[in-house]
Amino acid sequence: MKLCIPTMDDKGLQGVPSAHFGSAPFFTFVDTDTGEVEAQSNGGDHHAHGACRPLDFLGTRPVDAIVCRGLGRRAFSRLESGGVAVYVSSEKDVEATVAALKEGRLRRLTSEEACPGHDHDHGHGHGHGHAQSPGLGQGRGQRGGFGYGGQA
């Protein structure tokens, strides 16, 4: 499986996952079949909110899945439409993220969980606990998991 993990650095398997897909400084690509790992700078890391074109950022690299901590609904929709699965992870580095996926401990992100788009700086990390409306909030749960509030 060919994975893309948005990261804060280009340290390969020791890379630190970014809190948000589109604003990640790097994409780390992992081929779980061959073990090949390569980090690439994200040319779109300073996009305007809502202008994320994830398939363009990935360039000509074919990927089967994105493994991230969070991304916007538009990016999610574009990835899903392009046949790219999106998984949620809160692992500490790329290596642990890949291991968790291989072990079946990661789950697919749903459109309801994707960041709905809001008027604030993308310098935040998910798990920031802001609420869009009653019952809609995202926060870090115990043991590093994410909590997503439902509609009230």
Image (cartoon, rainbow, N blue to C red):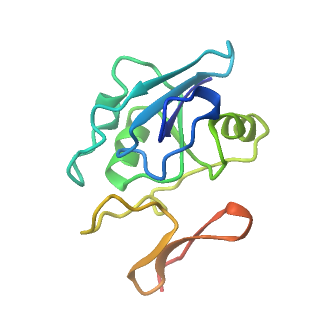
Give me the residue at 64% from left, 33% from top.
14
Give me the residue at 67% from left, 48% from top.
91
Give me the residue at 47% from left, 34% from top.
84
Q: State left or right for residue 23 relative to residue 9.
A: left
Looking at the picture, tell me which residue is in the foreground, 21 or 81.
Answer: 21
The x and y percentages for residue 121 are 28, 63
Give me the residue at 49% from left, 47% from top.
18
The x and y percentages for residue 69 are 53, 52
The x and y percentages for residue 3 are 56, 29
Q: Is residue 98 above or below residue 120?
A: above
**Extreme top residue here?**
34
**Which quarter of the figure has residue 26?**
top left
**Which quarter of the figure has residue 30?**
top right
The x and y percentages for residue 37 are 59, 20
Q: State left or right for residue 143 relative to residue 36.
A: right
Q: Is residue 36 above or below residue 105?
A: above
- Total of numbered circles in the picture? 0
**Which quarter of the figure has residue 116?**
bottom left
Q: Is residue 50 above or below residue 45?
A: below
**Extreme right residue here?**
103
The quarter of the picture where the N terminus appears is: top right
Q: Is residue 121 above or below residue 149?
A: above
